[in-house]
Image (tube, helix red, strand yellow):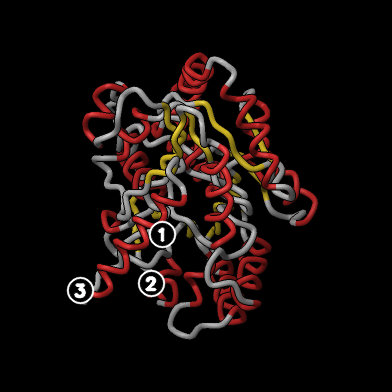
Amino acid sequence: MNIYFPILTLDITTLRNPYLRTLIQGIKSITKDVEISLGIDLFWQSKCNNYDIIHIMWPEDLLLNNHTSIDVENRLKELKSFGVKIITTCHNFHAHVPKSEENNLVYKIVYNLSDATIHLGQISYDIFKQIYLNVEQVIIPHHVYDTLYPNLFSKQESCRKIGLPLKNRYILCMGAFRNDMEKQFVCNIARHLKGTNYYLLAPTFVERKKRRYLIKYVQFLCFILKMKIKYPRMIIKGQPVSDEELPYYYGASDLSLIHRLEILNSGNLPLAFYMGKTVIGPDTGNVASILKNTGNYTFDTQNPNSVVKVLDAALSTDLKEKGLRNRALAIKEWKTATIAQSVVNLYKQILNY
């Protein structure tokens, strides 16, 4: 089977998002029957007509180099006329950034012309079953990054590694902050934690941009100091968390909070499960479905202040026990090899292989 992923890089190791990187590595580890190609320019070349499957992850990437949604539609129809099968993974209903009518339109076109769409949860699956009647809809969950983070670390070792006092308890907000609403959301939580022994661990609340000017660096340090004074219960690192550091942040934490207010899927959910953490997340999308079905916690995104009550309820329970149950589920059902095999099985099914 010849599979082509139209993405913005020819080198999978350069992808910052580990989802596709680890999935491809998982596929290659379980079968030698799959040949994989990457890159975006290939999509428009004639040799692309010979692939068995084009597996699209992020439809907006197809608009690179001034291509339009009409160009994409015509090209997909042409590829299908050559017998090429189109599979799309539904990470989002529409593009995160940049949001535009053209980006949103290309999503609809790709989903409509796919032979199969992979969903990471039940909610998007149910919605697409009603809209795209001629497309096969399949649920294959988001895998955990067990191959990327094979080792877990104790709270004691983790706190020592990243320089946190062992006596405190920590709520982890892992991942970038996309807008001011998300930042204000976690600031309100940090304010609520005053007088407790809990701290909000938000390492990438703000990240220092690489600039040479000393004044910019001083401004950055002043901002960090201002945040520490205003929100003493929030801990900010101010730079990206490396793959080497990430397991220690989870190891030091007692609870994982997904701070998105608009979301369909989140890689932080299966990651937190795998790391053995209880999770609080937004009551929206596939995230809500998974959290509710596993006995974790959700907050009302229309009333972000509701997270305070949810947080109090979660902190009054045995977080460690629930976290261990989450980890057991992740290992049983979401390991990379398990999910990679499900994807390969879908490839074979679509091709009658």
Instruction: Name the residue at the right extreme.
Output: 130
Q: Residues within 10 Å of mark 3 (few under 14, many from 20)?
A: few
Is residue 341 among what the camera can see? no
Earlier sequence position, callout 1 versus callout 2:
1
Earlier sequence position, callout 2 versus callout 3:
2
Q: Which residue is mark 3?
A: 214
Q: Position of residue 202 (x, y in %)?
A: 42, 45
Mark 1 and mark 2 residues within 8 Å of each other at the beta carbon: yes
Instruction: Report helix, strand or loop for mark 1.
Output: strand
Q: Residue at the spot x=39%, y=70% of the render?
A: 40
Q: Residue at the spot x=66%, y=73% of the render?
A: 105
Q: Give the number of the disc on residue 4.
A: 1
Q: Give the number of the disc on residue 334.
A: none
Q: Position of residue 288 (x, y in %)?
A: 66, 38
Give the Cα distance between marks 2 and 3. Answer: 43 Å
Mark 2 and mark 3 residues within 8 Å of each other at the beta carbon: no
- With respect to residue 74, does 12 lie above or below? above
Q: How many marks?
A: 3
Instruction: Name the residue at the bottom extreme.
Output: 66
Q: Nearer the viewer, mark 2 or mark 3?
A: 3
What kind of residue is marked 2?
Answer: Leu
Q: Residue at the spot x=68%, y=32% of the render?
A: 309
Q: Which residue is mark 2?
A: 42
106 or 75: nearer the viewer = 106
Q: Can you tell which quarter of the image residue 93 is in?
A: bottom right
Q: Residue at the spot x=62%, y=51% of the render?
A: 261
What kind of residue is marked 3?
Answer: Leu
322 or 86: nearer the viewer = 322
Earlier sequence position, callout 3 versus callout 1:
1
